Amino acid sequence: MESRRFDPKKLDKLNNPDRLSYLDPGLIWDSVGLHSPKTIIDIGAGTGFFAFIFAGKMDKGKIYACDISDVMIEWITEHTPADIKESVVPLKMEENSLPLNDGIADLVYMINLHHELEQPVKLIVEACRLLEVGGMLAIIDWKKEETPEGPPVSIRVSEETIEHQMQGGGFGKIRKYGILPYHHFLVGEKTRYGCKT
Ligand SMILES: C[S@@+](CC[C@H](N)C(=O)[O-])C[C@H]1O[C@@H](n2cnc3c(N)ncnc32)[C@H](O)[C@@H]1O
């Protein structure tokens, strides 16, 4: 099967500020509604486009900008703005596995990653492992319909499927926000019943 993974040679596309018109970080941040998060994990961070913005919204604490691609991790390392260097930690990860301890995060998020995943439930279970009880997983990915930009509709994932996968991975209280024009936006909570394995 042909890889769905984003081609790092096209990384300039990820830094296009036009993306902010339909993926408004302020709206996303306010909807998740965390108060003074200490640890955030961005899975599939790409060039850190969103991690850099969210780092600027944190009082203190760390945001781990994680990616499977060495090219992306090198790019983040070289381009993190000086004023947020203390907050952003670039981190190479393997498919479905991050070198971080259990229960460290208030929020794990994935933006424009879900349609690239071979084993989404495995990664959702890994996100659950990383979260503290009550922590949130936010998944934002292209709606499964024609939009002015984005990957082929055939490889996009429906909102219902993402919701079932989150439930299958152990998340509850799933909220679906219909506020982004081209993207599904789901947020689930790690419950005290723990994660699926
Ligand atoms: C389309 S880009 C989105 C980047 C970023 N989230 C954004 O919206 O600007 C997807 C990124 O996910 C990474 N990726 C793909 N599969 C992954 C996986 N299983 N685990 C971690 N990163 C992955 C790719 O290397 C790429 O950098």
Image: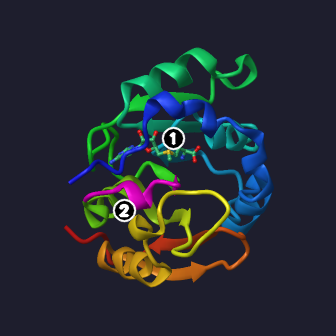
Q: Earlier in the sequence, mark 1 or mark 2?
A: 1
| Region rendered in magenta | 110-118
**Residue 40: percent from left, percent from top:** 55, 47
Q: CA distance from mark 1 to mark 2?
A: 18 Å
Q: Residues within 10 Å of mark 2 (few under 14, many from 20)?
A: many
Instruction: Reply yes or no: does residue 175 show up in magenta.
Output: no
Which residue type carries mark 2? Cys
**Residue 96: percent from left, percent from top:** 27, 50
Q: Residue at x 52, y 55 (%)?
A: 112
Examine the image and state in which quarter residue 181 appears.
bottom right
Q: Quadrant of the N terminus?
A: bottom left
Image quarter for ligand 1: top left
Residue sitting nearer the eye, 74 or 58: 74
Q: Residue at x 41, y 61 (%)?
A: 115
Q: Which residue is mark 1?
A: 45
Residue 169, numbered circle: none
Q: Residue at x 72, y 17 (%)?
A: 82
Residue sitting nearer the eye, 165 or 173: 165
Residue 128, numbered circle: 2
Q: Is mark 1 within 8 Å of ligand 1?
A: yes
Q: Residues within 10 Å of mark 1 (few under 14, many from 20)?
A: many
Q: How is the image coloured?
A: rainbow
Residue 61 appears anywhere in the view:
no
Label 1 sits on a secondary structure element that is loop
Using residue 1 as the reference point, say whether residue 171 is left or right of it: right
